[in-house]
Image (spheres, rainbow, N blue to C red):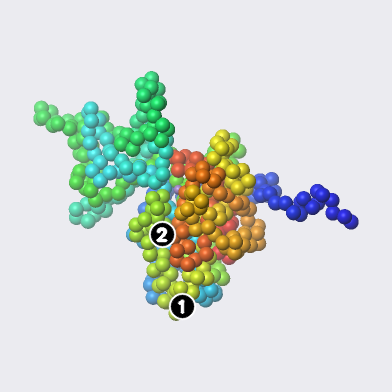
Amino acid sequence: MEETAKELEKRLTWKFPTIAKKSPEQKEEAFAYCEGYKAFLNAAKTEREFTAQAAALLERSGYAEWAPGRKYAPGDKVYVMNRKKALIMTTFGTRPLEDGLRLNAAHIDSPRLDLKPNPLYEKSEMAYFKTHYYGGIRKYQWVALPLAMHGVVIKADGETVEISVGEKEGDPVFCATDLLPHLSADQNERKLKDGIKGEELNILLGSLPFDCGDEEIKEAVKLQILALLHGTYGITEKDFLRAEIELVPAAKAVDVGFDRSMVGAYGQDDRVCAYTAMTAEIATKHPEYTTVTVFADKEEIGSVGNTGLNSNFLLHYVMDLAAAAGADYRRVLEHSLCLSSDVNAAFDPTFPQVYEEKNACYLGKGCVLTKYTGARGKSGSSDASAETMARVIERMDAEGVYWQIGELGAVDAGGGGTVALYVAGLNVDVVDLGVPILSMHSPFEVASKMDIYHTYKAFLAFYK
Ligand code: MN
Ligand code: MN
């Protein structure tokens, strides 16, 4: 029988399906999976908290701290921490290391407000912290919003004091203030990018003076804050010089929509990929290829520093693995395949002009495979080869993973980067894969539960 045009069309054309239409039965599994995800997001709002929570979970899941130089057997699971802000975990495979690794790199830092080194001041009998924002934020989104304070202070005697205020029921929160509409006539004339300026992101801390009786104290509100901080943490103003304190949205991860089909939370870029990678890595018991799952810090400011992926900490780990197994690390890297696991911008029908609809990713169609990121003609991306795309697509198709492709916006609409180019710099085949996100880098990012679940499934397929 002759093929009809309809049949030919079906055979020759391609459209990414919507998961809930093709496989509605997966809704329940996806929703159940995201309960654990939301709980983890709430417990791990900063890179330090993420590594601490992850290490505890890995210990409970049969991982041991990696011992350099030791020979491991297939099925052994190890992890190693880098300066409490980055983490690598491995499940040893049956194949020799020189056949390559299954690398997976996600980042666990998110845009936020960091305290300046000398942050505390008083003005008009109110006390404030000065901040310097971290990563790409739209500053106007960070005012008139409850913020929680997380971080560490190293005291002169070396003791580390951990701070977390604004998360527990009944905790106070903090905020940067904004103008009222009645008095914002001048501010309204500013360009949106300057709607709130960097030096206007000042954090309100208190308004009561220290009870000093008759004594003349010039900044009694500031003194009151210092007295409270000293009472609780034993710290003084000088100790802020040895601190890292971050302000993040105080809200918890929640379901979004009448149908509860989405998760709304701060910092899903990129903890959504870190969480899905970690749970897939834990679930992988007897892989063929040895897995190396990396949680990196500092991606949001260019993968800088010794906890970011533009440092040698991952390379040195692979060199050590190779040395212990009597393998040549250059062969190991050359034959490795890496997923640079990061989020992409989901098509937003409210702002269609910045997307190109045929090459955008969409909520509910699965994880997004991003061949290249970058800006101005792919600059700053690693641009995965056709061969690399083929290897990853084969894995996902073989395991029934719903996936789609996506470019980060229309050509010349903007752009961005990930850790992919730094992994590629190690002579590893790499491509970006992750979850489509709405309102990326805002205090409340939105992701589809179906996509989150299928990113987990993509990682399972990749490690298998
Ligand atoms: Mn990211
Ligand atoms: Mn980002």
Q: Residue at x 37, y 56 (%)?
A: 304
Among all residues in the image, which is located at the extreme right? 1
From the viewer's perspective, tell me whether residue 3 is left or right of residue 376.
right
Q: Residue at x 50, y 70 (%)?
A: 334
Comes first in the chain, label 2 or label 1: 2
Q: In the image, residue 128 lies at what x, y percent?
A: 27, 35
- Residue position marked by numbered label 2 in the rendering: 309
Q: Residue at x 40, y 72 (%)?
A: 320
- Label 1 crowding class (10 Å Cα cut-off): few <14, some 14-19, many 20+? some
- Label 2 crowding class (10 Å Cα cut-off): few <14, some 14-19, many 20+? many
Q: In the image, residue 131 lies at what x, y percent?
A: 31, 41
Q: Nearer the viewer, residue 332 or 163?
A: 332
Dot 1: element: loop
Q: Amino acid at mark 1?
A: Ala
Q: Amino acid at mark 2?
A: Leu
Q: In the image, residue 29 lies at what x, y percent?
A: 61, 50
> Residue 327's mark?
1
Is mark 2 in CB contact (under 8 Å) with mark 1? no
Among all residues in the image, which is located at the extreme top? 182
Among all residues in the image, which is located at the extreme left? 215
Residue 1 visible in the snapshot = yes
Identify whether 240 is placed above or below 203: below
Q: Nearer the viewer, residue 402 or 93?
A: 402
Residue 460 visible in the snapshot = no
